[in-house]
Image (cartoon, rainbow, N blue to C red):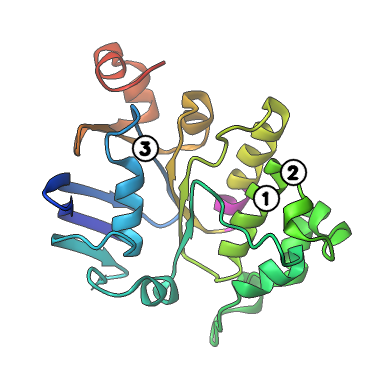
């Protein structure tokens, strides 16, 4: 098991934001975390990466409990994070943004390492615009840049929060296709996504969140066959 979350509890002050969250992700999986707004999906990702430190529970990554470590240590362990608001550095060029994500991966096979050259193969527009300041790129390009910068850390697992939010349908398809490529290249993905069709076209398994808790777990096929779960937890 690549990632196993056990009984995770996170608080915002006195507000119990996550209540005994348990879930797992195997190597090579795409797992979608779905639910209505305000249920705790983004908080789950932030708790895993350490931006919202959980009060109790376990975040076991590669057989090591990383709960309580600072975010940069968790990233160094092999978990990448793509935030909902992208957080690209507008005053830096595309290539400078990418270089910000570089991590030493000594001992990893050369074909498994995400280099600038490999990124430019998967994201051709970046090669053409590598000197362009990020603030002059489109929303879709900034989303791609945020994903690519996370890949430069050579993660085994990528946490991605709402990658298609606010994007035009054609760009949504491009983002969906690149996520499929990334997964095919060996990176596991935990995806928070409001677009049900995009999420279920990518995911191997799905978790549905109610208020601060996991309410359902199953394969995409099982979810499709369960209209009660979709009605209870989703807006589709």
Distance from the alpha carbon under mark 2 to that under mark 1: 6 Å
Q: Are marks 2 and 1 in contact (CB under 8 Å)?
A: yes
Q: Nearer the viewer, mark 2 or mark 3?
A: 2
Give the number of the disc on residue 138: 2
Q: Residue at x 35, y 62 (%)?
A: 49
In the picture, measured across the screen, residue 140 lies left or right of residue 132, that is left
Considering the whole magenta stretch, tell me its main secondary structure: helix
Span shown in magenta? 181-185
Q: Secondary structure at mark 2?
A: loop
Q: Is residue 184 magenta?
A: yes
Tell me: 229 left or right of 94. left
Q: Residue 92: x, y in percent?
A: 72, 67
**Residue at 25% of width from left, 57% of height from top?**
4
Q: Is residue 120 left or right of residue 33?
A: right
Name the residue beneath numbered marker 3: 205
Image quadrant containing the N terminus:
bottom left
Left or right, 199 with reference to 130: left
Which quadrant, please, contains the C terminus?
Answer: top left
Task: Work out whether residue 162 or residue 93 is closer to the camera in this orientation and state it.
Answer: 93
Please state the horizontal and vertical placement of residue 13, each as a whole percent of the image.
Answer: 16, 53
Instruction: Characterize the local packing of mark 1: few (<14), some (14-19) or many (20 or more) Cα atoms within 10 angstroms.
Output: many
Front in this rendered view, residue 14 or 159: 14
Q: Give the distance between the C-alpha atoms of the residues marked 1 and 3, in whole angstroms.
A: 28 Å
> Disc 1 marks which residue?
142
């Amino acid at each position: 098991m690549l990632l196993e979350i056990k009984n995770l509890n996170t608080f915002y002050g006195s507000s119990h934001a996550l209540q005994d969250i348990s879930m797992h992700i195997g190597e090579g999986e795409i797992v979608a975390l779905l639910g209505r707004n305000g249920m705790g999906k983004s908080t789950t990702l932030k708790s895993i990466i350490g931006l919202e430190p959980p009060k109790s529970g376990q975040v076991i990554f590669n057989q090591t409990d990383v709960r309580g470590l600072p975010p940069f240590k968790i990233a160094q362990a092999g978990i990448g994070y793509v935030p909902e608001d992208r957080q690209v550095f507008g005053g830096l060029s595309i290539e400078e943004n990418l270089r910000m994500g570089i991590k030493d991966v000594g001992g990893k096979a050369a074909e498994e390492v995400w280099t600038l050259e490999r990124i430019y193969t998967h994201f051709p527009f970046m090669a053409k615009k590598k000197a362009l300041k990020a603030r002059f790129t489109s929303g879709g390009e900034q989303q791609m840049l945020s994903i690519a910068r996370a890949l430069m850390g050579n993660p085994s697992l990528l946490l991605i929060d709402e990658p298609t939010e606010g994007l035009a349908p054609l760009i949504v398809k491009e983002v969906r296709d690149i996520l499929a490529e990334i997964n095919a290249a060996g990176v596991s993905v935990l995806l928070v996504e409001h677009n049900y069709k995009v999420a279920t076209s990518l995911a191997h398994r799905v978790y549905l969140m109610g208020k601060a808790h996991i309410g359902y777990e199953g394969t995409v096929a099982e979810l499709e066959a369960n209209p009660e779960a979709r009605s209870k937890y989703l807006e589709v």
